[in-house]
């Protein structure tokens, strides 16, 4: 194998696939990145057996030659070392050549590295996913869906299925739900022509976080393929595989109340900032508890009290208030995460009582729903 490539293109590709490489793997070859050079271009692959990322760099793009392949072939190179070398090479062009016994020569300017490679035939095959059943989302929308849900997944392995986001395919479209048993985030997307052979999967939160990092911030089409074991996200130059979590995701629909005793409409950004300030005194507390109390039809009070530090009270204007007076305590972190997901819009907060789950929605868009369990403080 022998080819010359623009260093910047190679570095960008290596950085993307490196996100799937784990140094803790028990399969030695997975500490490496696989390089496949062909007349069409270069394919880079990184994997930790749970996530596999492939990046394709074509020989030319927009009239600019990116790669010149002299001899097609494949090699696996130690990922971290290869990344460090490419990052520090002195010129914009890199020549990579595989010699006898997988010895790999990397040249740039006056730098000449020799790395010991591994046989690419030993690298695990990418999963086989039926490409017949797919749907498509714009990359920026997919990243938004991930941002609005993935923070609510569980970090505890006691119920592994809750460490993922549940994607449900329903008649009205795609419903994405995450919960750690103390809070819930839900995002609905109206879509047509969804596949019918898979109705519910749990995608690991870690996978979705890594996917979000490698997707562009534009309207690039992302084709999504699902089966019962794997999910595949594909753009023109990126392929991202993830295993799915086993087990049945709990029925979260029954957690969402049907009726409410108190409804408050408030500026989400102002509420977020008030809770952030109140949490300064609550950070020493294990639950980081902040209280919300209704004052009158135009005002709520956000407060926090720490016996060792002191207390804080702040009044926040509300756009509207209907229903019963209320005093409720909750985790400041959970509330701030929920408000950030709704992204500073005007929010309606709906309560069914001081010890019942409460709901946050955007006034302008009911596609996003956040649910939080209150904290008992007495």
Image (cartoon, rainbow, N blue to C red):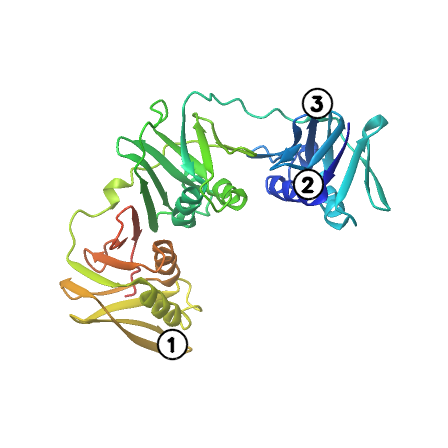
Q: Give the Cα separation between the discs numbered 2 and 1.
A: 56 Å
| Mark sitting on residue 121 | 3
In the rendered view, does 105 fall on the left or right side of 260? right
Instruction: Please tell me whether mark 2 sits on a helix, a strand or a loop.
Output: helix
Q: Which residue is mark 2?
A: 10
Q: Position of residue 255 (x, y in %)?
A: 25, 45
* Eye-nearest disc, 2 or 1: 2
Q: Give the Cα separation between the discs numbered 1 and 3.
A: 64 Å
Q: Nearer the viewer, residue 152 or 99?
A: 99
Disc 2 crowd, CA 10 A, few/some/many (<14, 14-19, 20+): many
Instruction: Please tell me whether mark 1 sits on a helix, a strand or a loop.
Output: loop
Say which residue appears at 74% left-offset and 42% top-offset. 82
Contact between labelled residues 2 and 3, with CB atoms less than 8 Å apart: no
Q: Quadrant of residue 321?
A: bottom left
Q: Which residue is mark 1?
A: 307
Q: Position of residue 110 (x, y in %)?
A: 86, 46
Disc 1 crowd, CA 10 A, few/some/many (<14, 14-19, 20+): few
In the rendered view, does 120 fall on the left or right side of 151? right
Whether 32 is drawn above or below 367: the answer is above
């Amino acid at each position: 194998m022998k080819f010359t490539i623009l260093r910047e293109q190679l570095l960008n590709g290596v950085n993307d696939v490196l996100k799937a490489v784990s140094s803790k793997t028990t399969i030695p070859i997975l500490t490496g990145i696989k390089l496949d050079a062909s007349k069409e271009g270069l394919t880079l692959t990184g994997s930790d057996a749970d996530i596999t990322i492939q990046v394709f760099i074509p020989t030319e793009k927009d009239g600019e030659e990116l790669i010149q392949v002299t001899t097609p072939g494949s090699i696996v190179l130690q990922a971290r070392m290869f990344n460090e070398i490419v990052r520090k090479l002195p010129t914009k062009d890199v020549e990579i050549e595989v010699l006898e016994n997988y010895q790999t020569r990397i040249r740039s300017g006056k730098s000449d590295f020799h790395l010991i490679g591994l046989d690419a035939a030993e690298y695990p095959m990418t999963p086989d996913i039926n490409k017949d059943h797919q749907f498509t989302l714009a990359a920026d929308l997919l990243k938004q869906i991930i941002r609005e849900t993935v923070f609510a997944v569980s970090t505890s392995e006691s119920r592994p299925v809750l460490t993922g986001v549940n994607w449900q395919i329903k008649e009205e479209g795609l419903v994405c739900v995450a919960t750690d048993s103390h809070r819930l985030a839900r995002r609905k997307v109206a879509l047509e022509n969804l596949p019918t052979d898979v109705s519910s999967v749990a995608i690991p939160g870690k996978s979705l976080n890594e996917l979000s990092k490698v997707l562009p911030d534009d309207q690039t089409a992302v084709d999504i393929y699902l089966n019962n074991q794997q999910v595949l996200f594909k753009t023109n130059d990126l392929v991202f595989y993830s295993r799915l979590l086993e087990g049945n995701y709990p029925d979260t629909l029954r957690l969402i109340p049907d009726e409410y005793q108190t409804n408050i409409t408030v500026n989400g950004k102002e509420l977020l900032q008030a809770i952030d300030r109140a949490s300064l005194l609550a950070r020493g507390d294990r639950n980081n508890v902040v209280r919300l109390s209704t004052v009158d039809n135009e005002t709520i009070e956000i407060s926090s009290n720490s016996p060792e530090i002191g207390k804080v009270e702040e009044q926040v204007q509300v756009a509207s208030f209907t229903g019963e007076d209320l005093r409720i305590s909750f985790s400041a972190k959970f509330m701030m995460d929920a408000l950030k997901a709704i992204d500073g819009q005007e929010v309606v907060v709906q309560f069914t009582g001081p010890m019942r789950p409460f709901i946050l929605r955007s006034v302008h868009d009911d596609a996003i729903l956040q649910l939080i369990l209150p904290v008992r403080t007495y």
